[in-house]
Image (tube, rainbow, N blue to C red):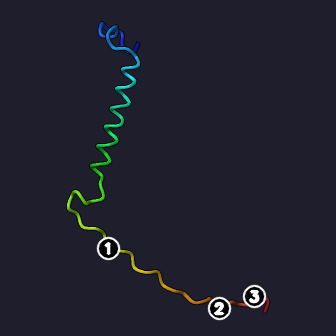
Amino acid sequence: MIFDSKLDNYIPDYFMKLLRIIAALGAFAGVTLLTSCGCCTGEEKPIGLRPLPQFGPLPTIDATK
């Protein structure tokens, strides 16, 4: 049993484990909803990234000369 109290006789271990799992799932769902993409909070979407520059080939230097 988990606790050494009078309630220990009334709350079995499997129920406490199930309660912990349900609490963890509830916390996960709450965090997921609170950290949404902004569609629920009215925030604007961020602007897109600019395209990367296109570089040409670099000149090679002959180090043996």
Residue density around tag 2, few if under 14, some if 14–19, many if 20 or more, within 10 Å = few
Residue nearer the viewer, 65 or 61: 61
Q: Are marks 1 and 2 in contact (CB under 8 Å)?
A: no
Residue 13: image location, x then y, percent: 40, 17
Q: Which mark is residue 63?
A: 3
Q: In the depicted view, which residue is nearer to us: 59 or 19?
A: 19
Q: CA distance from mark 1 to mark 2?
A: 36 Å
Q: Taking 5 as reference, is 35 above or below it?
A: below
Mark 3–mark 2 distance (CA, rounded to whole Å): 13 Å
Q: Mark 1 sits on what residue?
A: 47
Q: Would you place residue 32 above or below residue 54 in this image? A: above
Q: Of marks 1 and 2, which one's residue comes earlier in the chain? A: 1
The disc placed on residue 7 is none
Q: Position of residue 15 (x, y in %)?
A: 36, 20
The residue singled out by tag 2 in the image is 59
Amino acid type, mark 2 = Pro
Of tags 3 and 1, the one toward the viewer is: 1
Image coords of residue 19 (percent x, y): 34, 26
Sequence-wise first label, 3 or 1: 1
Residue under the image location 20 percent in, 62 percent down: 42
User: Mark 3 against mark 2, which lies toward the viewer?
Assistant: 2
What is the crowding at mark 3: few (fewer than 14 residues within 10 Å), some, or many (at least 20)?
few
Q: Kindly check if marks 3 and 2 are in contact, taking CB atoms under 8 A apart as contact.
A: no
Residue at 29% x, 54% y: name it: 36
The residue tagged with tag 3: helix, strand or loop? loop
Q: Residue at x 26, y 60 (%)?
A: 38
Observer-nearest of 56 and 31: 31
